[in-house]
Image (spheres, rainbow, N blue to C red):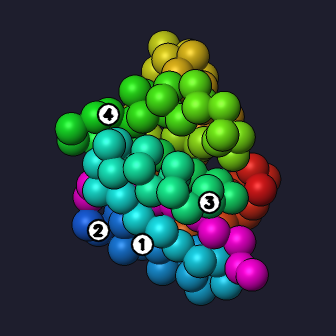
Amino acid sequence: MATRILIAEDDPQNLYLVKFLLENRGYEVLTAADGHEAVVVARAENPDLVLMDMLLPRVDGYEATRMLKADEGFSRPVVALTAYSMKGDREAILEAGCDGYIPKPIDPNTFVDQVEKYL
């Protein structure tokens, strides 16, 4: 079975690019358009990795990450995909429970290699 990655991203262009790059390398991609949907899909599908935009509608990525990390049945890495990677932002991302972060805009030449470090 292919490695499955959940992308929680509300921007259609960002989602398209990330999904394209991952599928092109053979990954199965699941998607969620907001934090609530990300939590529901992650709990139901148990993907190998979650890529979480931090600024999502309904439930933001910080809260969605905290919810997943508090769930004893979910133990997969959650990696922030964010344009906010200044010192205070990095601390907030890690405090929310993210295992790391990949800054946006992503670099299409190195993105999949960055993702694979967390698998």
What secondary structure is marked by label 3? loop
Give the residue at mark 3: 47
Q: Are marks 2 and 1 in contact (CB under 8 Å)?
A: yes
Q: Which residue is pictured at 67% across the width and 84% down the height? A: 26
Q: Based on the displayed image, in which of its 4 quarters is residue 113 positioned?
A: bottom right
The answer to whether residue 60 of the structure is visible from this angle is yes
Sequence-first tag of 2 and 3? 2
Frontmost of labels 3 and 1 is: 3
Amino acid under label 4?
Asp
Quadrant the N terminus occupies: bottom right
Circle 1 packing at 10 Å, graded few (<14), some (14-19), many (20+), is few
Say whether residue 98 is magenta. Answer: no
Image quadrant occupied by the C terminus: bottom right
Between marks 3 and 4, how big is the CA–CA gap? 19 Å
- Magenta span covers which residues? 1-11
In the rendered image, which residue does mark 4 sit on? 60
Residue that carries the numbered disc 1 in the rendered image: 17
Q: Residue at x 64, y 77 (%)?
A: 27
